[in-house]
Amino acid sequence: MRLTGPLIAANARRAADGAAATVAATRTALDTLEPRLADIPGHLVAAARLRIEHPTDSLPELAERCNLTKDAFAGRLRRLIALAGRAR
Protein backbone atom coordinates (compact mmCIF):
# COMPACT_ATOMS: atom_id res chain seq x y z
CA MET A 1 0.00 0.00 0.00
CA ARG A 2 1.35 3.36 -0.97
CA LEU A 3 0.73 6.25 1.38
CA THR A 4 -0.84 9.34 -0.11
CA GLY A 5 -0.29 12.93 1.00
CA PRO A 6 -3.13 13.04 3.54
CA LEU A 7 -2.07 9.73 5.09
CA ILE A 8 1.54 10.86 5.35
CA ALA A 9 0.42 14.11 7.00
CA ALA A 10 -1.83 12.24 9.43
CA ASN A 11 1.00 9.87 10.38
CA ALA A 12 3.34 12.83 10.93
CA ARG A 13 0.76 14.53 13.16
CA ARG A 14 0.27 11.37 15.23
CA ALA A 15 4.03 10.96 15.61
CA ALA A 16 4.43 14.59 16.68
CA ASP A 17 1.55 14.31 19.15
CA GLY A 18 3.01 11.11 20.58
CA ALA A 19 6.46 12.67 20.94
CA ALA A 20 5.00 15.72 22.70
CA ALA A 21 3.05 13.52 25.10
CA THR A 22 6.14 11.45 25.86
CA VAL A 23 8.24 14.57 26.47
CA ALA A 24 5.60 15.93 28.86
CA ALA A 25 5.33 12.61 30.74
CA THR A 26 9.11 12.35 30.93
CA ARG A 27 9.46 15.88 32.30
CA THR A 28 6.80 15.17 34.91
CA ALA A 29 8.55 11.93 35.87
CA LEU A 30 11.91 13.65 36.32
CA ASP A 31 10.29 16.42 38.36
CA THR A 32 8.56 13.84 40.57
CA LEU A 33 11.73 11.81 41.05
CA GLU A 34 14.04 14.82 41.53
CA PRO A 35 14.45 14.39 45.32
CA ARG A 36 15.73 10.83 44.85
CA LEU A 37 17.21 11.02 41.36
CA ALA A 38 20.53 9.66 42.65
CA ASP A 39 18.74 6.40 43.49
CA ILE A 40 17.30 5.96 39.98
CA PRO A 41 19.32 3.86 37.50
CA GLY A 42 21.47 6.18 35.41
CA HIS A 43 20.47 4.66 32.08
CA LEU A 44 16.82 5.55 32.76
CA VAL A 45 17.68 9.14 33.63
CA ALA A 46 19.95 9.44 30.59
CA ALA A 47 17.17 8.23 28.28
CA ALA A 48 14.76 10.72 29.83
CA ARG A 49 17.15 13.62 29.44
CA LEU A 50 17.85 12.67 25.83
CA ARG A 51 14.08 12.56 25.08
CA ILE A 52 13.67 16.03 26.62
CA GLU A 53 16.74 17.48 24.86
CA HIS A 54 15.53 16.23 21.45
CA PRO A 55 11.74 16.61 21.57
CA THR A 56 11.19 16.31 17.83
CA ASP A 57 13.37 13.24 17.25
CA SER A 58 11.66 9.93 16.63
CA LEU A 59 12.21 6.97 18.96
CA PRO A 60 14.42 5.23 16.39
CA GLU A 61 16.58 8.37 16.12
CA LEU A 62 16.90 8.65 19.90
CA ALA A 63 17.61 4.94 20.24
CA GLU A 64 20.34 5.15 17.62
CA ARG A 65 22.09 7.87 19.65
CA CYS A 66 22.32 5.36 22.53
CA ASN A 67 23.12 2.34 20.36
CA LEU A 68 19.82 0.74 21.44
CA THR A 69 16.79 -0.62 19.67
CA LYS A 70 13.68 1.52 19.56
CA ASP A 71 11.93 -0.92 21.90
CA ALA A 72 14.78 -0.85 24.43
CA PHE A 73 14.82 2.96 24.46
CA ALA A 74 11.04 3.17 24.81
CA GLY A 75 11.22 0.62 27.63
CA ARG A 76 13.63 2.83 29.54
CA LEU A 77 11.22 5.74 29.29
CA ARG A 78 8.28 3.54 30.34
CA ARG A 79 10.18 2.25 33.38
CA LEU A 80 11.13 5.77 34.49
CA ILE A 81 7.56 7.00 34.07
CA ALA A 82 6.29 3.95 36.02
CA LEU A 83 8.78 4.65 38.84
CA ALA A 84 7.47 8.20 39.07
CA GLY A 85 3.90 6.94 39.15
CA ARG A 86 4.69 4.70 42.11
CA ALA A 87 6.54 7.54 43.87
CA ARG A 88 3.50 9.85 43.89
Image (tube, grey):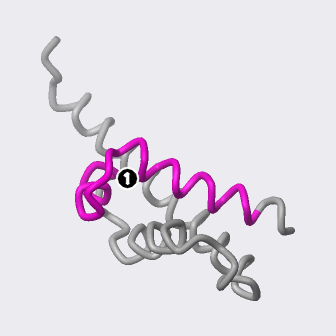
Residue 79 lies within the magenta run: yes
Which residue is depicted at the point 37% across and 46% down?
15
- Give coordinates of residue 53: x percent, y percent: 37, 77
Q: Nearer the viewer, residue 80 or 3?
A: 80
- Measuring 53% from the left and 66% from the top, which residue is drawn there? 44
| Residue highlighted by disc 1 | 16
How far across and how far down the image is residue 68, in percent? 31, 52
Q: Position of residue 33 (x, y in %)?
A: 72, 77
- Which of the two residues, 41 or 33, is positioned nearer the viewer here? 41
Instruction: Residue at the far top: name it.
Output: 1
Question: Among all residues in the image, which is located at the extreme right?
Answer: 88
Q: Is residue 40 magenta?
A: no
Along the line of sight, the residue nearer the viewer: 76 or 14: 76
Identify the residue at image location x=39%, y=72%.
Answer: 50
In the image shown, does 17 or 79 lie closer to the viewer?
Answer: 79
Magenta residues (range):
59-84
Instruction: Say if 11 sits above or below 81 in the image.
Output: above
Residue 29, picture quadrant: bottom right
Rendering quarter of residue 35: bottom right
Residue placed at 73% from the left, 61% from the top?
83
